[in-house]
């Protein structure tokens, strides 16, 4: 009887275990706006995010600012920013005019630490 019970418990563990690819969802909403305005030796830097997720937008903006200061951002390139709750892949546009620099980041994929993967899908 014990063997049967242990066998059933083991089988149910395997049956309900999540194995394989992470869950993928799409979203068509997000926060747009300036997240960070900072002065540096190079002038004023404005970091804006588009299609961002509300809970991680400040963290990702701060990481983008740090990447910009370290000269690790390139204009019109896709990058992945590693945040504390999620990794975000998106396109970065850098615009400069005199001493003003705008760093615009467009979210495309958010990979949460929980395993959920969200892909931005523009509704038309």
Image (cartoon, rainbow, N blue to C red):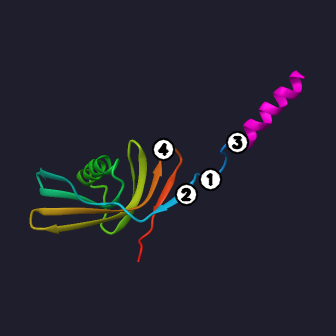
**Pointer 3: what residue?**
16
Of the numbered discs in the image, which one, if any, rests on residue 21? 1
**Pointer 4: what residue?**
113
In the displayed structure, would residue 29 be above or below residue 113?
below
Q: How many marks?
A: 4
Residue at the top extreme, as displayed? 2
- Disc 1 secondary structure class: loop
Using the rendered view, name the quadrant where residue 100 is placed.
bottom left
Of the numbered discs in the image, which one, if any, rests on residue 100? none
Residue at 36% x, 66% y is 77
Q: Earlier in the sequence, mark 2 or mark 4?
A: 2
Of the numbered discs in the image, which one, if any, rests on residue 24? 2
Distance in Å between CA atoms under marks 1 and 4: 14 Å
Q: Which contiguous range is marked in magenta?
A: 1-15
Tell me the mark number nearer the camera, choosing from 2 and 4: 2
Distance in Å between CA atoms under marks 4 and 3: 20 Å
Q: Are marks 2 and 3 in contact (CB under 8 Å)?
A: no
- Disc 2 secondary structure class: strand
Q: Quadrant of the N terminus?
A: top right
């Amino acid at each position: 009887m014990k063997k049967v019970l242990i066998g059933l418990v083991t089988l149910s563990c395997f049956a309900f275990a999540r194995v394989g690819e992470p869950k993928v969802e799409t979203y068509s909403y997000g926060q747009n706006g300036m997240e960070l305005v900072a002065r540096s030796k190079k002038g004023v830097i404005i970091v804006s995010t588009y299609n961002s997720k509300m809970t991680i937008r400040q963290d990702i903006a701060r990481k983008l600012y740090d990447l910009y200061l370290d000269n690790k951002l390139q204009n019109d390139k896709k990058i992945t920013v590693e945040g504390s709750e999620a990794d975000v892949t998106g396109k970065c546009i850098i615009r400069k005019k005199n001493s003003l620099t705008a760093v615009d980041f467009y979210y495309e994929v958010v990979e949460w630490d929980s395993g959920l993967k969200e892909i931005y899908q523009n509704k038309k």
